[in-house]
Image (cartoon, coloured by chain):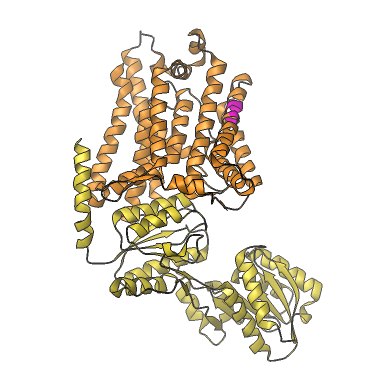
Amino acid sequence: MIRSTHLPLLITIATFLLAFTLCASQYPAMLSTRVVANLLTDNAFLGIAAVGMTFVILSGGIDLSVGSVIAFTGVFLAVILRDTSIHPLVAFVLVLAITISFGAAMGAMIHYLEMPPFIVTLAGMFLARGAAYVLSTDSVPITHEFYDTLQSLYWKAPGGGRFRLTGIIMLLTFLAGIIVAHRTRFGQNVYALGGGLSTARLMGVPLARTTIGIYATSGGLAGLAGIIFSLYTSAGYSLATVGVELDAIAAVVIGGTLLTGGTGFVAGTFFGILIMGLIQTFIVFDGTLSSWWTKIVIGGLLFGFILLQKGLTWATTLRRKPATEFAAQS
Amino acid sequence: MKLKAMLIAGALSFVPMTAMAADLTIGFSQIGSESGWRAAETTVTKQEAEKRGIDLKFADAQQKQENQIKAIRSFIAQGVDAILLAPVVATGWDEVLEEAKDAEIPVVLLDRTVDAPDDLYMTAVTSDLVHEGSVAGQWLVDETAGEKCDIVELQGTTGSSPAIDRKKGFEQAISGHDNLNIVRSQTGDFTRSQGKVVMESFLKAVGGENICALYAHNDDMAVGAIQAIKEAGLKPGEDIKIVSIDSVPDIHLAMANGEANATIELTPNMAGPALDALEAYLADGTMPPKWIQTESKLYTLKDDNMAIYEMKKDLGY
């Protein structure tokens, strides 16, 4: 049991270490603190969104609204900071309240109307993107001095790498995600839900509360990712982060979480993010490959991990045919 | 733990590694390939780097700023000698440009500028849109030599800076010449199909025989308009003189056939002046001016347009 569920995570970590070693053997400059710091800073918003996505996928659902919610958050913050004298911290609270309720509303629709998450969050994707466009179609710069303060918070490591606040927030989000997934009742319920609705009901999982909680978490983390993204670019732009939800899903799957739900680890997603960031870094270091190779390699990895998952599920069911095993049957 | 040891070793070996490389390594963060001109710019930049023996690291951002920021950070981590940046938007570059400055890597902006303090980049190589418009206007002033001429104008996308500035420059050049009047002016959205449709409406509204010249804010609209003029039974280039901006291959083909009269080049070679400035700076510290204006070259029927077409058609336009 332990071996088969931990295997995808171990394979992900092994893939990352192998990829990093290969990259470093070709470009020794990859072994600098700069590259490590860049991996954290540049993928901070994606990582935070992917933590939310991990919970959604663990429960057997999907959230397509993430990229749009990030863009909406950025534009909302930029416009509100430009037009009013509200302090950014108040604006952060406000926008998180909006995105959490937005996610909760989607969760409620999924549960009470028994609609597929795909359709509900697709509607959410259009809604959030549309709302961002209505606020502004231009890229709105954020010039508040509090932003400058936040951006100047970094620790400069030997070798020139800058570990910024945004990267630290991503690490903390992953830590919180790991604790919630494995150490709380909510986390257990998420896993149970991913094992199948009927079994979860039999186990006494509060379905409505859990489903709404999952999508509210994803919405809220997308909002947080939006705040981080606005810090990253010092602007809000309604065309930004198109397709980030798909990158997040890819990171979750490469991280070893089963797309059908029930099995996986938040920590795996972290390595999924790092692998994707590493591919991009390698392609820029090479400088001759088309940047679209990033997509091709990620596509290949996804296929590989899906095959791996299918193989593992198949092997486990064969071995444990007589036993009842929620996680493996999915 | 092993990884950590490797990281430290790598960080220590990082400085001598870059110092060993004799040739120049330059990173180029390009927006994407959304237009023919952009693709040509990429091709020309690669050619210019190759000509100078520069190792060019090319990163296509697929229209996303986050990809450009990532690419610039990777260039810095790699220890390139300089960075070329064609920014997708004007905002949000301060942080990453500061990192480049900190690492003493000069950054040159291509084709567009950014909203950042100008000590964060070395120079910007761009064209002057107003100047392009005025070159077109001046050409018409010289061409008509005082004879009465009614002009129709095909504007670019409403509100876009090329449309505003190219209109302004043209009007500046023809002001004070009472023989030249713009009788109709409408947007053709920079596209071939809209250029044709709007030109058709001009021909109907004003009458082909009353139009002496067409000024189009880009070549594509002019190519569309040529079609409309031909369909109206008139000879483009003779009955109606045509001047436009960009110098794409198809307008040179039209000029070779005598169907258009003049075009002003928006050169895809932004990298040439940029690399010249960088080489001078890296050789002996010569600081270039903050703005390098590219040449807005006028092409007329006197040039060998067929040869220009042949040369340009493979650049990716």
Q: Residue A104 in magenta?
A: yes
* Display colour for chain A: orange
Q: Residue B241 in magenta?
A: no
In percent of width and height, residue A146 lies at 50, 45
Left or right of B136 on screen, residue B110: left
Residue A249, picture quadrant: top left
Q: Is residue A290 visible?
A: no
Residue B139, picture quadrant: bottom right
> Which residue appears at 29% of the width and 57% of the height?
B79
In percent of width and height, residue B315 lies at 45, 68
Rendered position, A284 above or below B290: above
> Which residue appears at 40% of the width and 41% of the height?
A165
Q: Nearer the viewer, residue A292 or A207?
A: A207
Rendered position, A224 above or below B269: above
Q: Which chain is yellow?
A: B
Q: What stretch is highlighted in magenta?
A: A101-106
In percent of width and height, residue A160 lies at 29, 51
Left or right of B2 on screen, residue B309: right
Q: What secondary structure prevails in the magenta region?
A: helix
In percent of width and height, residue B292 lies at 46, 74
The quadrant in which the C terminus of chain A is found is top left
The quadrant in which the N terminus of chain A is found is top left
